[in-house]
Amino acid sequence: MNEFVSDFWSPWIAGVSLLSIVGCAVFLWATSIKRTSAKVDITGHVWDETLAEYNNPLPGWWTWLFYLTVVFSLVYVVLFPGLGSFKGILGWTSTSQYEGEMKEAAKTYDPIFDKYLKMDVKSVAANPEANAMGQRLFLTYCSQCHGSDAGGSRGFPNLADKDWLYGGDAEAIKASITTGRGGIMPPHGPVLGDAGVKEVANYVFSLSGRKHDASLAAAGKPKFEQVCAACHTPAGTGMQALGAPNLTDKVWLYGSTEAAVIETINKGRNGVMPAWKDFLGEAKIHLLTAYVYGLSQNK
């Protein structure tokens, strides 16, 4: 990459940019010269036998409008960055504009965020204004994975029910948003083999009362206790400290078909919830926590 950041490229880019602008002006001038010949030129394009395209200069007002764009371009590259490493007379950067806008926004919104930060999560969740703010934050930062209604999708938990991988109290939800989560299900296919995976899958189905093969489930029970119980507990009720799901209910993160469960056992899963601490800050996370917490309270 060194050749792309050398001192050569700045004057090269500046030269090409200026040459392009001046070239446009010259080309415009050359094509707008009035012809004195009595002969009428056509481009050679003819439609419907006699409808021809004439090669006439552009109208004067149109030509001067193009000249104005050339002048505008020259003024722009003098005032703003556009000529290699030259930063422009105004010294404008997208970063400085963003930081300025953020400072202005902070003056307006920080007092509001701080007001709710001083309240406990349950009180914030019951406040309509705070709930609306939390919903907008959720739609902006969380809906891409969990859906606009927080109903989740394959591999992304439903946040609107009472089934929680890491706990549904305010502290657990805030921890999930703040520091993120990493749910790792190791692949057990190499240990169990194809037959063993199918047996364990049928045993897992039996835990939640789903249709299953009783003989396969019976053969899968000791294998489950040996390989899976450490995370999901011997009863299959899961362990929120690890994010290991409860296998006795009817909630399935990656699908409830036999093929989906076999795939999970065979290949494992690796779910990641990113940490939002550095990006959103404590006050916004507090509002988000209250919104998510409130989603499941009336279920």
Image (tube, rainbow, N blue to C red):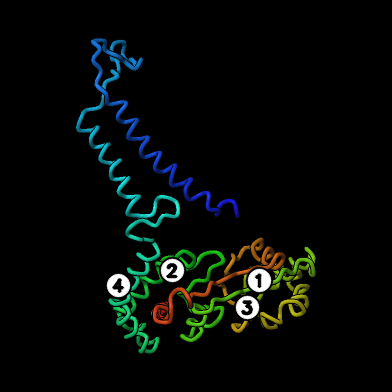
**Lower sequence index among marks 3 and 1:** 1
Contact (Cβ within 8 Å) of mark 3 with mark 4 = no
- State the quadrant of the C terminus: bottom left
> Amino acid under label 1?
Phe
Q: Position of residue 189 (x, y in %)?
A: 76, 66
Distance between the alpha carbons at the discs numbered 3 and 4: 44 Å
The residue carrying mark 3 is 244
Residue 187 vs residue 73, the one in the foreground: 73
Distance between the alpha carbons at the discs numbered 2 and 1: 35 Å
Instruction: Residue at 49% x, 81% y: name it.
Output: 173
**Lower sequence index among marks 4 and 1:** 4
Q: Position of residue 210 (x, y in %)?
A: 62, 70
> Amino acid under label 4?
Glu
The residue carrying mark 1 is 205
The residue carrying mark 4 is 104
Instruction: Residue at 30% x, 18% y: name it.
Output: 53
**Lower sequence index among marks 2 and 1:** 2
Contact (Cβ within 8 Å) of mark 3 with mark 2 = no
Residue 192 vs residue 146, the one in the foreground: 146
Nearest-to-viewer mark from 2 and 4: 4
Question: Is residue 182 something that shows in the picture?
Answer: yes
Distance between the alpha carbons at the discs numbered 3 and 2: 25 Å
Q: Position of residue 97 (x, y in %)?
A: 35, 64
Nearest-to-viewer mark from 4 and 1: 4
Badge 2 element: helix
